[in-house]
Image (cartoon, rainbow, N blue to C red):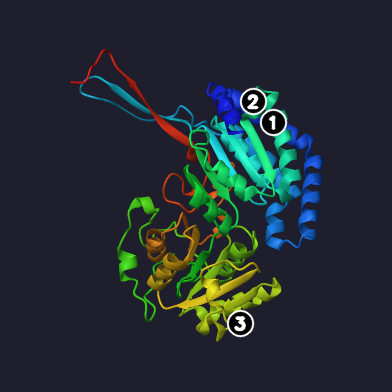
Amino acid sequence: MAESASAAHRQMLGFTSRTKRDILYSIADELESCREEILDANKKDISESRSRGRSEAFLDRLSITEHRFGNLVRAFRVIADSKDPIGEQISRWIRPNGLEIVRRRVPIGVIGIALESRPHVIALASAICFKVNNAVVVVGDGESSRTCKCLARVIRNGGERRGLPADALQVLCSDDNLLDGRILTSLEGLVDVAILRGDPAFVTDLTAHARIPVLKHTGGLCHIYVDCDRMKPPAGGPPRVSAAAPGFSTAKAALEIPSPEAGALPAGDPQVNPVDIDSAVEIVMNSRCAEPYSCNSANVVLVHKNIASRFLMALAVKAEAENVELHGDDRAVALLPVKILADADEWRNPRKEIVITIGIVDSLEDAIEHINKLGSHLSDTILSSDIGAQNVFMRDVDSAAVYSNASTNFTDGGEFGMGAEIGLSNDKLFARGPIGLEDLTSTKYIVRGSGQTRV
């Protein structure tokens, strides 16, 4: 399969942007025409998995709903119309000896993907990889086999109508997907990089056995920090940096302006987006409940001690209405109407149930230290009207995506305007955050000379 994909990739090297656009639009049309067939195959996979006693989180990842299907089709068209990064000139310079050196963006080659119960990734991977002239080899599990095989056939049929080699997408589904994944990640010289999506044990095993580069889409333990009493100022008053609350110094946060790369604004900048307690509660609930089984869902909420009683009172009312359980540390439990003490594992690993785990902290610095020590380094947010505190949080929290006054659920390729993503990476090398088009390219140096020889 990898050899066939490698041969297909070589045929794709000459594809123009127009050719790739036509291929992706043709696949989108084919998907739409086969909608009922794909959804029916998915329903059969879900029914069989449910009969095996699979968890709701597993079934959610396995499901392709009408809404998700519409997003898949839309992703093909958005990516088709996106800027083509292949051939892009990244940099250019001329050496004293007259050599012209140009660094350009080129395809990687063959992308391997190992999956557990995420059949929609086949479609997203195809859209992104074909746009940047890459072929794809997918190893899936037996429980998603009907959906995966149906999607693969429809995608290949749609692509072939516009000249895509049939072997540009290879899909293998079996109950031995861990063993198949080990083989996939051992294929040096045939598969250039593998993207791993599954439970932590699955990803860890394949990473340990890999002989090729891997990108790990691992589970996320995302955090929200609710800042101290710096919520929305009185009506008509401009946003401002609040005076320090007892036990918390803002002098450093307010006066120090982090580097522009951190996305920092000066303290007191009018662009700051004020939030009030009601808005903060809505952001917390959205971060946890909008996509409760996704890796960008926020599980842990850290609350500054000076606002804890008022914020937790409002959060408890909303959580009860939404049937969301609140757990907490000793200080939080003392303020909650339903007193459930969080266990030790909740601070390190997401719970399978829809639970919000709450901790009370004494300072911004304490919150940052907690997140950097126990978080997954994927998606974290601060809720505050103090731009100085926002700047420090976004500079010092070591995560792939750091927010102020927004839901952690936005860490998604589609929401970032990338069309789609193959996964979310916590790694720092090669790709970090949503894995999109540019992340699945490499670079090449084009060197033009006029007879130069090295002395």
* Quadrant assignment for the C terminus: top left
The residue singled out by tag 2 in the image is 164
Q: CA distance from mark 1 to mark 2?
A: 8 Å
Image coordinates for residue 196, horizontal then vertical, percent: 56, 48
Say few, some or many: other residues with alpha carbon within 10 Å of mark 2 (under 14 / 14 to 19 / 20 or more).
many
381 versus 195 height, above or below: below
Image coordinates for residue 174, horizontal then vertical, percent: 69, 46
Q: CA distance from mark 1 to mark 3?
A: 52 Å
Q: Earlier in the sequence, mark 1 or mark 3?
A: 1
Q: Are marks 1 and 2 in contact (CB under 8 Å)?
A: yes
Image coordinates for residue 101, horizontal then vertical, percent: 32, 25
* Amino acid carrying mark 2 in the image: Leu
Q: Are marks 3 and 2 in contact (CB under 8 Å)?
A: no
330 versus 104 height, above or below: below
Q: Is residue 5 visible?
A: yes
Left/right placement of residue 338 relative to residue 228 reads right
Q: Nearer the viewer, residue 267 or 75?
A: 75
Classify mark 3: helix, strand or loop.
loop
Q: Quadrant of residue 92?
A: top left
Q: Which mark is residue 340?
A: 3
Q: Is residue 384 visible?
A: no
Left/right placement of residue 445 relative to residue 153 reads left
Q: Nearer the viewer, residue 357 or 443?
A: 443
Q: Earlier in the sequence, mark 1 or mark 2?
A: 1
* Amino acid carrying mark 1 in the image: Arg
Q: Nearer the viewer, residue 103 or 239?
A: 103
Q: Residue furthest top?
A: 451
* Amino acid carrying mark 3 in the image: Ile
Image point (40%, 53%), residue name = 263
Classify mark 1: helix, strand or loop.
helix
Left/right placement of residue 120 relative to residue 449 reads right
Q: Which mark is residue 221?
A: none
